[in-house]
Image (cartoon, grey):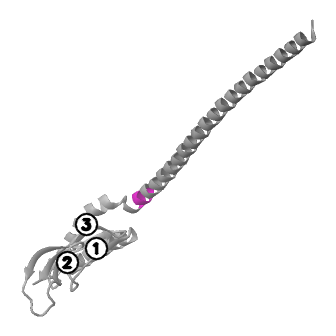
Amino acid sequence: MTAEDAKQNEAQEELSSVQDEAVESETLEGDINALQAELDAMRDEMARMKDHSMRALAEAQNMKRRAEIDVDNARKYGAEKIVTELLPVVDNLERALQAADAELDGVKPVLEGVELTLKGFLDALAKSNVEIVDPHGEPFDPAVHQAMTMIENPDVESNSVVAVMQKGYRLNGRLLRPAMVVVAK
């Protein structure tokens, strides 16, 4: 083998080594690009999962808050139906007291019994946070009063309540029944 052949062999080996390194470099670059793409995909997935978990947590908190409000409303307004059904009894007791003649013999003890019964009813309603809406002399409010009729009355201010035909009631601030009133023109 001549010196020239040896140089040629050496040059071919060097060229082959450079080509191998270039192929290896391209392979590594491809691997790095693939790993970078996979890393980006994982970051996107992690962001989606974080967003999903934050939304789920917010939803759980909202459900808890709604449940607390529902329980509070059930506690506050659970007696609404029975109170509404008992209001006509109170109305009838009040009418009985208005219609009775206390001057008649034997009626006075009955009237006292009706008064005590009415007082017991009203005390029980007050303990249950039921408020009476008796707007006599107040300005008419359609959110709380139901106008039954209007009359001319120069002695009172226009649009004010001159008579209450039936009292209204509230339970914990919520209107159960509007007061039925007569309003001045």
| N-terminal-most mark, 1 or 2 | 2
What's the mark number on residue 118? 1
Magenta stretch?
Answer: 71-75
Q: Position of residue 40 (x, y in %)?
A: 61, 38
Viewer-proximal residue, 20 or 65? 20
Disc 3 vs disc 2: which is toward the camera?
3
Quadrant (top left/top right/bottom left/bottom right) for the C terminus: bottom left
Magenta span: helix, strand or loop, mainly? helix
Q: Is residue 28 left or right of residue 133?
A: right
Residue depicted at 58% across the width and 38% down the height: 45
Q: Amino acid at mark 3?
A: Leu
**Would you name the residue on which mark 3 appears?**
87
Q: Residue furthest top?
A: 1
Report if the CB atoms under discs 1 and 2 are less than 8 Å apart. Answer: yes
Viewer-proximal residue, 56 or 17? 17
Residue depicted at 76% across the width and 20% down the height: 19
**Would you name the residue on which mark 2 appears?**
97
Q: Is residue 28 left or right of residue 171?
A: right
Dot 2: what SS? helix
| N-terminal-most mark, 1 or 3 | 3
Residue 171 higher or lower than 57, as above or below: below
Viewer-proximal residue, 34 or 80? 34
